[in-house]
Image (cartoon, coloured by chain):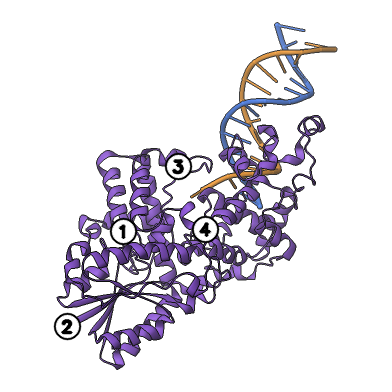
Chain colours: A purple, B orange, C blue
Amino acid sequence: MKSVLFWFRRDLRVADNAGLYHALESGGRVYCTFIFDRDILDKLPSRADRRVEFIWESLQEVHQQLVANGGGLIVRHASAKSEIPKLAAELGVNAVYTNEDYEPAAIARDRGVALELNKHSIGFEAFKDTVVFEKSEVLTLAGKPFSVFTPYKNAWLKKVSDADLKPFPSEQLLDRLAPVDSPAAMPSLASMGFETTNIKSILTCGMSGAAQLRDDFINRIADYKDARDFPAVKGVSYLSTHNRFGTISIRELATVAHAETVRRKNIGAETWLAELIWRDFYFQILWHSPHAAVSAYKPEYDQLAWQNDQELFAAWCEARTGYPIIDAAMRQLNQTGYMHNRLRMIVASFLTKDLLIDWRWGEKYFADNLNDFDLSANNGGWQWAASTGCDAQPYFRIFNPITQSERFDPKGKFIRRYIPELSNLPDKFIHAPWTLPPMDAQATNFVLGRDYPAPIVDHALQREKALAMYKAVR
DNA sequence: TGAAATGTTGGGGCG
DNA sequence: ACGCCCCAACATTTC
């Protein structure tokens, strides 16, 4: 009798899961597994990693739902590239099914797994599940991949139909799961060498957490366009980590956004749909241009003479640049593993164009600390900010951190949330505490350098240096 | 999904 | 009354 092993990776849900659906639909017995992949986990810089805990929490729900339907999740802590073939052989399955992962390292791993399986006449199939359109599904009229977002978005919107967004009702076929003999308990975080981070106090995990955030966001999606740029306001979806780990289906989210856009001309939904399309855009960019994972998308920018000052980088990481909007943003990242999108642009512009530090340093710091870290979007975003990427902002577009702060946090509400030592400063001066008049400093008992650092660089000066640095490579 | 420098305009103060 | 200057306020260009 035919049997299939379904391998969960970045699709931690049982509902509307393309690969799981195809496995269940294939007619045989279906086993399910998740591997805490040592090839990935052993390289993580911290043993207190919120992502590992998010995965662990989310897997509890997957496991429970599989058990409730007579199956179970086989969870192991091992090197996936050898463990998957080993498990497939143990179970005697005919094939391993999974959902496609488009990152260079994942592509290499999957190729190795497929080769090893094929040696034993076991099949390997990967399905599109993470994105609406993958690889070369959206191309220019000339048959080339897009490198500019707006025409890509137009082509995406023109191409998309109900069929592309149709769910794969895997949850309706769970009765076809193979029973797992006395499913062993999932390895604990501690047994894998990880500490508890209390992720649940920051983010609701799993399918239920995703559904809760989805419902909450849909109620305010009409305000998205106006509210999304203000970090002190609850304006964005907060679904990014769920999209990273697939605890909710991208088809489901795109369906809602698309329907609201088309039927109700909901400008908020339209704006948010564009963000989902950005996600597809960056996935296909990296798939077509894997060199961008390690170097500038536009090679001429690999010649930029970054100053790469270790002290300035440490100040940026540790939120002591003296620019409140930058430091508040970095504290948000350090304390919660999340940073508001507007702030990501501001701190990225500051790192590259004020501190003159290689965008890859910032990319790595985000990769290590963001709960929602996804290689393609993180790399795309950093290259956009550093002006080295496809459809990047022009090099001379340099954010003024004070102007951005005044515009997007006008009352300093976000700054005060993360930098309480500035809470008594008047709104007018909270964006640039070094401009606080002596009278106000006395009245609020605020001493620059004692209560909060003086700015580590002068924006006007650094801006000129950045312009010179970029001009030199043109 | 900017900001700064430069250019233009027009109202009001003033001789 | 008139011209001149100053300088916001807005527009354009430059990076």
Q: Mark 4 lies on which chain?
A: A
Query: Label 1's element?
Result: loop
A230 left or right, relative to A212: right
Badge 2 is on which residue? A2
Query: Label 2's element?
Result: loop
The mark nearer the N terminus, 2 or 3, is 2
Q: Are marks 1 and 4 on the same chain?
A: yes
Quadrant into which the N terminus of chain A falls: bottom left
Kind of residue at badge 4? Ala
Q: Are marks 3 and 4 on the same chain?
A: yes
List x then y, in percent, for residue A117: 31, 88
The mark nearer the N terminus, 3 or 1, is 3
Q: Do labels 2 and 3 share a chain?
A: yes
Q: Nearer the viewer, mark 2 or mark 3?
A: 2
**How many angstroms separate mark 1 from mark 4 (CA)?**
29 Å
In the image, residue A309 sits, relative to residue A85, either above or below, namely above
Kind of residue at badge 2? Lys
List x then y, in percent, for residue A128: 30, 68
Q: Answer whether residue A206 is visible to the viewer in this image.
A: yes
Badge 3 is on which residue? A235
Kind of residue at badge 1? Ser
Badge 4 is on which residue? A392
Badge 1 is on which residue? A249
